[in-house]
Amino acid sequence: MAGGRFISFEGIDGSGKSTQARLLAEYLRGEGREVVLTREPGGAPGAEEIRRLLVEGAPERWSPESEILLFTAARRDHLEKTILPALEAGRIVISDRFADSTRVYQGATRGDLRAVVDRLHELMIGIEPDLTFIIDTEPKAALRRGLARESGEDRFEEFGLPFQEKLSAGFTALAEEFPARCKLIDGNRPPEEVAESVRAIARRALA
Ligand code: ADP
Ligand code: TYD
């Protein structure tokens, strides 16, 4: 990875992670760092095409097993076309979601498929971020924020509040599973306060 650093943001839908990914990218650019801000599903032209299949349409459109394959196909394209070239050029890559989303959404919430997710990840992706921020926001507030956007990309939000609550518990468990890499951040605060917590950790990690 020749000098580059890989940071991901995770959390339930509407938790505020895209806002925080953007604020961290702006901050680091202001410090003179070269930053590539990207997202999943998507982040490369082919992966963005796969994104539309996943985030639009009826909730039951895909089984959890089919979702694992589609998200992993999109991730492989994102990795080849965007993430690895940027890391090799020594840039900081900030991705709004990465493999932890598949571990929690498909591995622990949509299905009980964590072993499948892990095997496919090892076979096809094989890397983890250096640092992961999990934005931990109360599910009811996050769902309200997410649906208020009216983005037309609400397939996962439409699984409802119990689904978002299960996801939230899944992300907390993940932070306990990978304590060195995953930092749980309280997202129930104004964006600028959340951003300050994120910056403090990022500064230390990148020093
Ligand atoms: P996510 O990427 O997790 O789905 P976004 O960052 O897109 O979340 O935020 C979802 C909505 O909530 C947006 O309209 C955004 O402006 C708003 N928002 C983001 N962070 C906060 C916050 N800390 N408090 C209140 N609203 C927020
Ligand atoms: P995203 O655009 O980040 O949605 P939001 O802004 O609402 O958080 O991601 C699209 C949806 O895809 C989101 O509901 C989470 C889901 N998802 C998975 O189920 N598995 C995955 O591996 C990824 C990357 C996303």
Image (cartoon, grey):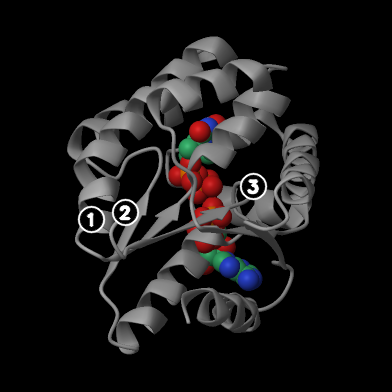
Tag 1 and tag 2, C-beta contact below 8 Å: yes
**Left or right placement of residue 39 versus residue 186 in this view:** left
Q: Is residue 59 visible?
A: no
Residue 142 visible within the image: yes
Answer few, some or many: residues within 10 Å of disc 2's Cα (few below 14, many 20 plus, some between 14 and 19): some
Relative to 140, is 13 on the left or the right?
A: left
Q: CA distance from mark 3 to mark 1?
A: 30 Å
Q: Nearer the viewer, mark 2 or mark 3?
A: 2
C-alpha distance separating marks 2 and 3: 29 Å
Q: Earlier in the sequence, mark 3 or mark 1?
A: 3
Q: For mark 1, give the secondary structure.
A: helix
Q: Quadrant of residue 64?
A: top right
Residue 194 in the figure: left or right of residue 154: right
The residue at 46%/65% (across/down) is 21
N-terminal of the pair, mark 1 or mark 2, is 2
Residue picked out by circle 1: 88
Per the model, the C-alpha gap separating discs 1 and 2 is 5 Å
Point 23% across, 41% down: residue: 44
The amino acid type of the residue labelled 1 equals: Glu
Which residue position is annotated with label 2? 1
- Mark closer to the chain start, 2 or 3: 2
List the residue tagged with mark 3.
12
Q: Amino acid at mark 3?
A: Ile
Asked whether mark 3 and ligand 2 are closer than 8 Å, the reply comes as yes
Relative to residue 23, is residue 103 depicted above or below? Answer: above
Q: Quick one: label 1, few (<14), some, or many (20+) residues within 10 Å? A: some
Would residue 188 be found to the left or right of residue 75 on screen?
right
Q: Position of residue 179 (x, y in %)?
A: 73, 55
- For mark 3, does the 10 Å Cα neighbourhood hold few (<14), some (14 to 19), or many (20 or more) residues? many
